[in-house]
């Protein structure tokens, strides 16, 4: 700690554009659009504008789970929003989510009166209620328990992503105090989940719910050591009940499909950058797209 340069905040904070690390080009202290750009619209009533981050994966998993239940009205178009290129600040996107964060959903079931839904937890609840309380208990203690865990995730994850993940993996300098502070909180949250999952099969009880769908992309990947390359640092193997649950959820076919949608990292076969039809999982993953492009550009023999 002694090597830290003391910092005295000025009387009035000023925005230093050069002090934002790898996200300096897209982070700013004001809201609103930076450029005019309309959003594309596909053939389905549900239009999703997103990226395969943990918050984006929540919604694509939910949609794939709904389709697996036979809710054909959950068919959707998933459009890629490259947040590292500032596409979330286009005028069309801002009109759907004034907070300029993915995911954003536009329900065009009634094209004359489209419904916008933003914030991933709100989208999960909206979809659950739209399709007959799917993955969401209808009333009583079970509903209260499910919603409590859903909102636990919404309130807790920023400490993991914007706190621990930022200072451990992305900040331009390593600050011991910040990493210690958020590592402690990340481990405390994992312990909360571990103690809960020691007595229940799923987070909200005996049934798989929107709570699991919301929590798994964050804490499931964290406890499997697949987030921020921090598995050893956080000793995630110690949270055995969370590991059991994470592996159980990961085996669900809808989860495996949902994790591929709008993904731009990892193995090319795991990236379905846009999704407009169920058949896209078989024909339009990035490995197939690049192989077809390479074949088309090869000279005839």
Image (tube, rainbow, N blue to C red):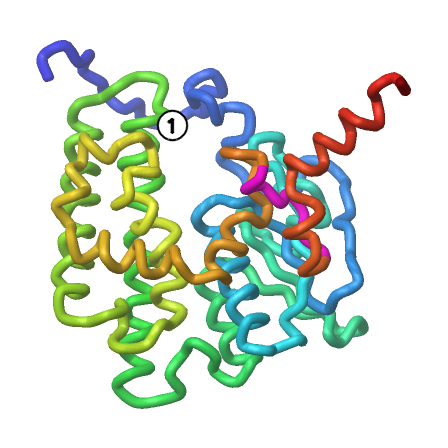
Q: Which residue is mark 1?
A: 13
Q: Give the vertical position of 71 relative to 99 (above or below).
A: below
Which x, y percent locates residue 147? 33, 73
**Residues in magenta?**
269-276
Q: Nearer the viewer, residue 297 or 82?
A: 297
**Looking at the image, which residue is at 79% across and 27% down?**
295
Q: Give the vertical position of 10 relative to 2 (above or below).
A: below
Q: Main secondary structure of the magenta part?
A: loop
Q: Secondary structure at mark 1?
A: loop
Which x, y percent locates residue 293? 78, 29
Residue 152, quarter of picture: bottom left
**Looking at the image, which residue is at 78% across and 56% down?**
41
Can the viewer see residue 236 in this picture? Answer: yes
The residue at the far front in this view is 301
**Looking at the image, which residue is at 26% across and 67% down?**
203
Residue 205, quarter of picture: bottom left
**Looking at the image, which residue is at 52% across and 45% down?**
52
Quadrant including the N terminus = top left
The residue at the far right in this view is 300
Q: Nearer the viewer, residue 220 or 249?
A: 249
Quadrant including the C terminus = top right
Q: Nearer the viewer, residue 299 or 65?
A: 299
Question: Does the magenta-highlighted stretch encompass residue 299?
Answer: no
């Amino acid at each position: 700690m002694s090597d830290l340069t003391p910092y005295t905040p000025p009387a009035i904070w000023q925005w230093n554009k050069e002090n934002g690390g790898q996200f300096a080009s897209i982070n700013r202290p004001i809201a609103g659009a930076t450029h005019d750009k309309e959003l594309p619209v596909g053939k389905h009533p549900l239009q999703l504008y997103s990226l395969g981050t943990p918050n984006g994966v929540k919604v694509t998993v939910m949609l794939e789970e709904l389709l697996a239940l036979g809710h054909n009205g959950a068919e959707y178009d998933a459009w890629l929003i490259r947040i590292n290129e500032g596409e979330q600040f286009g005028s069309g996107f801002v009109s759907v989510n004034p907070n300029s964060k993915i995911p954003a959903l536009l329900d065009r079931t009634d094209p004359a009166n489209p419904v916008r839904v933003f914030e991933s937890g709100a989208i999960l609840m909206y979809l659950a209620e739209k399709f007959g309380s799917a993955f969401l208990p209808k009333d009583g203690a079970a509903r209260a328990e499910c919603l409590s865990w859903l909102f636990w995730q919404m309130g807790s994850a920023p400490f993991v992503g914007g706190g621990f993940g930022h200072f451990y993996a992305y900040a331009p300098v390593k600050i011991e105090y910040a990493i210690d502070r958020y590592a402690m909180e990340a481990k405390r949250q994992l312990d909360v989940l571990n103690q809960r999952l020691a007595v229940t099969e799923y987070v909200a009880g005996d049934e798989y719910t929107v709570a699991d769908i919301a929590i798994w992309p964050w804490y499931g990947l964290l406890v499997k050591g697949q987030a921020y390359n921090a598995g050893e640092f956080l000793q995630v193997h110690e949270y055995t009940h969370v590991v059991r649950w994470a592996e159980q959820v990961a085996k669900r076919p809808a989860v495996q499909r949902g994790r591929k949608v709008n993904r731009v990292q990892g193995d090319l076969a795991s990236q379905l950058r846009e999704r407009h039809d169920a058949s896209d999982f078989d024909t339009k993953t990035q490995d197939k797209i690049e192989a077809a492009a390479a074949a088309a550009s090869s000279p005839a023999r």
